[in-house]
Image (tube, rainbow, N blue to C red):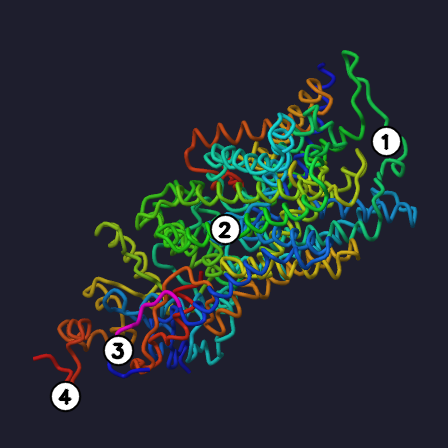
Amino acid sequence: MSNQIIQGILLGGYYALIACGLSFMFSVMRIINLAHGSLAVFAAFALWWLASRFHIPPFVGLLIVLPLMAAIGWALQRFLLERSARGGALLPILTTFGLAIVIDNMLFEQFGADTRSLAPYIGSLSYDSWEWPGNIYVGKLAVIMFATAVILLGGLQLFLTRTRLGRSIRATSEDPDTAGLVGVDARRANAIAASIAMVTVGLAGAFLGMRATFDPYAGAPQLLFAFEAAVIGGAGSLWGTLVGGIVLALAQTVGAQVHPQGFLIGGHAVFLVVLFVRLSTSGLGLRGLLRLPSRSAS
Amino acid sequence: MSLLSVEDLVVRHGLLQAVRGVSFRIERGETLALVGANGAGKTTLLRAIAGAHQPAAGRVLLDGADLTNVPSHKRVGMGIALVPEGRKLFVQMTVEENLLLGRTASRPGEWSVDRVLDMFPNLKPRRHAKTGHLSGGEQQATAIGRALMSNPEVLLLDEVSLGLSPLIVDRVYAALQGLMASGTTIILVEQDLSRALSVSDRVICMLEGRVALEGPSKAVSRDEVTKAYFGLHRKSPGSVPA
Amino acid sequence: MSAVSSSPIIERGTTTSRIAAIAVAVIIALLAIAPQFLSAGAVDRMTALFIYVILAAMWNALAGFGGLVSVGQQVFFGLGAYFAIRLADAGLNPFASLFVSAIVVGVVSWPLSLFMLRLRNGEFAIGMWVIAALTHLLVNLDRLVQGETGTSLISLNVYDAGTRRVAIYWLALASMTALLGILFGLLRGSTGAAIRAIRDNEDAAASVGVRVTGTKRLLFVLAAFGIGVAGALWLATSITFQPKTYFNVQWTAYMIFMVLVGGIGTFEGAILGALVFFLIETWFGGTGVWYLVGLGATAVLFSLFLPRGLWGTIEGRFGLRLLPVGYRVRLPENAPADDGSAPSPERTTPGQEKA
């Protein structure tokens, strides 16, 4: 059982990876990007295509895919989100949902319905494991994934609090008009934030492909996982996403123990319970639940 | 050439015309006070100069360069800094972070975090406190400091005394006095008429979006300004109230 | 226009709207007798159209009027079908179970609303999606459904195919008419003013005493009930129940497409959108994936460039009202204009009465 708990915690690293981009974008631009999961699957397919077609190993492929994702983030913000956000809070939901449908079906059109995986292209990493004291085996990939999540979250935190660009992004998220008045180019800050978010999505997509299988319609569940982890953990700090991811993964692990189909049910259930508790104690709804970290939270 | 000139500026909020054809010039080193009742268009005028509102007509020139299509963040780089009404600090961020944000435009100059803290010594112990937790006076000092950090050519001050106790207002103005003496060009909106007249070189009184009175602060009488303030100054026949 | 009075004129209907009301009655009557003249396939297609109209109108009621964008409305579609299966299995007449099922869906949605309506915007949108995903998984656990294998509304097979087809057609037509009627009545009545106030500015509405939550809850439950009816009717036409098909997010995608294209927040827009969707599906449905890509892309383009949809644009440009749910204020045409700053009647009218 302790073995499963450790696996669950490590899986939480993946959920934190996929959730941090979603909550980052929400906290900066107040937009929940419904194409988030589909874009992660897109990145996974891009890596798979590079690997199967040109024999580029996924870790090398990231050097191509991550800049591509950054460019997509920039374009997404400039051409889609910026425009639709001007039409109110509801329009971006519809725009990004439409985008998700387009991406999913384009992937289906390109790659067909088969499930794919990046596991065959990363050699023994997909099954190698370390033995820890107490007869516990942990997969190397799972540990790398968890470490990546920690490094990414820590790096983002440092970037936001210690650099000029990070401060500009935080200022824009707090008050874009005033940010302009102190000299911050709010459009640029938002586009950079979207690029960063998409780079994290690209990383999440890579790990999705390495640790499991994916198909063109796998985006929707990834979006739900990201959202659930962000909400469960999102108490104001990026580290919250890690906690949220771990809680989600543990709930799924417990669910799977209870019933063969309980894996997903467990995750959704714990999300709703957390939501319920939070709503009944705060009485304020979720406003401000997915917030950007401030220095004192670090 | 005047440092800043405003020519026939018209600014609308939807169907409402807040500024209706305002023109004035300000020379380098001058301090201009804008007075007028609530809703006279002072704040809108300052925000339009800073680029936060797009004018419907007219233009703003800085050193002869037309600013019409220049967004607000670039105007900061060109030397216009606004201390907005209500201070508008980034409350989730610390005093130091707010000040550092003022340096985003990277204009060369002598202002630094330490210099701002020297100017407002009461901020020194609060350097790493979030601005949301500061007192009104400390917040105002931070807002002014943030604007100064961009080393502006023209500093626009919008009701810096709003919501502060008289003692704190005195302190803020004492700090500003140094700036004015050092030759910084300032446009300030101030509700307190005597203070506005005493600190400025020139005064403009606005009424319903238009300039009702303009003149050297030393030459205009308090009475004249009061009349303009309430719209009692119009000399044209028919509009003078009995 | 008479020059006698310069005070604004307040009116509900227009001449066009009175003609439209008569036309609606005629159309419904014609649709009611249509199965006499239509082929079996055409009757089935028309039934599908009625269901699409229900889906569009209900999603529009929620998003366009209540300001609640949900991407999980497939949960009510699926539950409508699932409860109908369950009720029929328990021995209820299959036709009766279609409607009892929808009522159950409406009842279930009430406690759900207590919880979900406290979420805002995007959080509500995905929150509903989570609910749909979870419900789908739980329905899969039901032995009767046998997981993704699914089951059928077998008891409907006691009726012969012809009778069944026409009966379902009529039921769908009647449901559509009734639901549109309820929505129309709601929007025209005192709730309607509240709904429009919320749509335009929720906080302002709350501050003048509009019961925001109560009104939203009403729309949420109505939408759940209506979509439940649609799900049950869909089950009746296709007989088989596979959870994957009914709890598919595609249903919500269709709803969003119809409402965005037709005109979000306009009563007529949702109906127009359903018609457009129906035609597109008829012509391009066979192209498979590209058809879905096209739907998604169209939704994106409409939300970016024509956010008021076809009907909203027509309405704004021509001041046309077919089924007026609000009041309109017309300034007499000779009203003096104050140096251009006074609003002209053409500009205010669409702003004052958009529903």
The amino acid on which the numbered mark 2 sits, given as a three-letter code, is Ala
**Residue B92 part of the magenta-drawn span:** no
Depicted C309 relative to depicted A133: above or below? below
Q: Residue at x 36, y 65 (%)?
A: C12
The subunit carrying tag 1 is A
| Element type where label 2 sits in the image | helix
On the rendered structure, is C329 left or right of C84? left
Task: Give the image location of residue C208, x and y in percent.
Answer: 30, 51
The amino acid on which the numbered mark 3 sits, given as a three-letter code, is Ser
Q: Name the main secondary structure of what is drawn in magenta.
A: loop
Which circle marks residue A125 in the picture?
1
Which circle marks residue C6 in the picture?
3
Q: CA distance from mark 4 to mark 3?
A: 30 Å
Magenta part of the chain: C5-13
On the same chain, marks 4 and 3? The answer is no
The amino acid on which the numbered mark 4 sits, given as a three-letter code, is Pro
The subunit carrying tag 3 is C
Q: CA distance from mark 2 to mark 3?
A: 36 Å
Nearer the observer, A229 or B33:
A229
In the rendered view of the protein, which quadrant contains the N terminus of chain A? top right
Foreground mark, 4 or 3, reads 3
Task: Give the image location of residue A233, x and y in percent.
Answer: 57, 32
**Mark 2 or 3 closer to N-term?**
3
Q: CA distance from mark 3 to mark 1?
A: 82 Å
Which circle marks residue C286 in the picture?
none
| Element type where label 4 sits in the image | loop
Q: CA distance from mark 1 to mark 2?
A: 52 Å
Q: CA distance from mark 2 to mark 4?
A: 59 Å
Foreground mark, 1 or 2, reads 2
Nearer the observer, B186 or C211:
C211
Pointer 4 residue: B237
